[in-house]
Image (spheres, grey):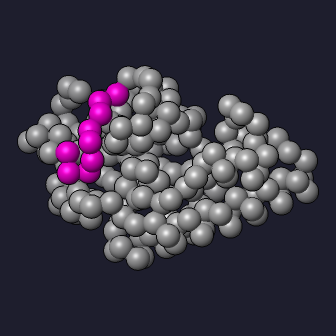
């Protein structure tokens, strides 16, 4: 990851900054999602009544799971330090705005921009990243995406921005891996300084 200046860090939420006990296998089974298909893409293809029912089920599961989760250690400090240094902090999540607001209020964290699935720019696409670049007047070399999933890697690689994966989930693609938020902070600030 060689760059002139980092001006923006894009963060995924669930699994990256926030630990929520999602059992995605069980959730997919509950919603009847076929093997190998994403939940949101599956629901989107359904007839209107079925789509509304499944989306309501998903929202209920997400809300309950969010209430059981907790912010990862070191996140508040990392976000505060990025703000102090004038680096934009963006949250890009396929979760709901309602859940994001709950987490932001509960933990007193803040972002310069929040993009949730209600905006219609879900991962693994790159529409949200292109939007972020345009809104802040950035080029690809000034941005890093921090996530934990194949959707995050795909979005970053499509957008040709650097990717850092937090955690040990086995993934394919072009990225750097860190163990946790503490290691992420060390990597970011060593690179910025």
Picture layout, residue 134 above or below residue 56: above
- Tell me the quadrant of the picture where the C terminus can be found: top left
In percent of width and height, residue 14 lies at 47, 54
- Tell me the quadrant of the picture where the N terminus can be found: top left
In percent of width and height, residue 162 lies at 33, 30
Q: Is residue 38 left or right of residue 44?
A: left
Picture layout, residue 17 above or below residue 173: below
In percent of width and height, residue 160 lies at 41, 25
Q: Residue at x 24, y 60 (%)?
A: 74
In depth, the one of 38 and 10 nearer the eye is 38
Name of the residue lying farthest toward the left: 193
In depth, the one of 33 and 159 nearer the eye is 33
Q: Residue at x 33, y 54 (%)?
A: 89
Q: Which residues are the magenta region? A: 175-183
The verdict on residue 166 being magenta is no
Does any portion of residue 159 appear in the rendered image? no
Q: Is residue 44 left or right of residue 71?
A: right
Q: Quadrant of residue 91?
A: bottom left
Q: Residue at x 36, y 73 (%)?
A: 107
């Amino acid at each position: 990851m060689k760059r002139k200046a980092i001006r923006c860090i894009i963060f995924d939420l669930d699994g990256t900054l926030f630990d929520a006990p999602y059992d995605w296998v069980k959730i997919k089974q509950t919603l009847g999602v076929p093997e190998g298909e994403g939940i949101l893409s599956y629901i989107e293809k359904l007839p209107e009544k079925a789509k509304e029912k499944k989306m309501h089920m998903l929202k209920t599961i997400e809300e309950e799971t969010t209430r059981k989760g907790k912010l990862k250690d070191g996140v508040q400090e990392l976000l505060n330090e990025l703000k102090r240094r004038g680096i934009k902090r963006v949250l890009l999540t396929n979760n709901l705005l309602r859940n994001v607001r709950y987490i932001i209020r509960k933990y007193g964290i803040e972002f310069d921009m929040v993009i949730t699935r209600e905006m219609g720019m879900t991962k693994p696409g790159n529409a949200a990243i292109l939007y972020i670049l345009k809104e802040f007047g950035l080029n690809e070399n000034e941005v890093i995406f921090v996530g934990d999933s194949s959707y995050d890697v795909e979005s970053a690689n499509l957008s040709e921005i650097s990717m850092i994966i937090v955690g040990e989930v086995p993934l394919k693609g072009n990225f750097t891996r860190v163990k946790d938020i503490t290691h992420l902070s060390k990597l970011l600030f060593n690179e910025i300084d």
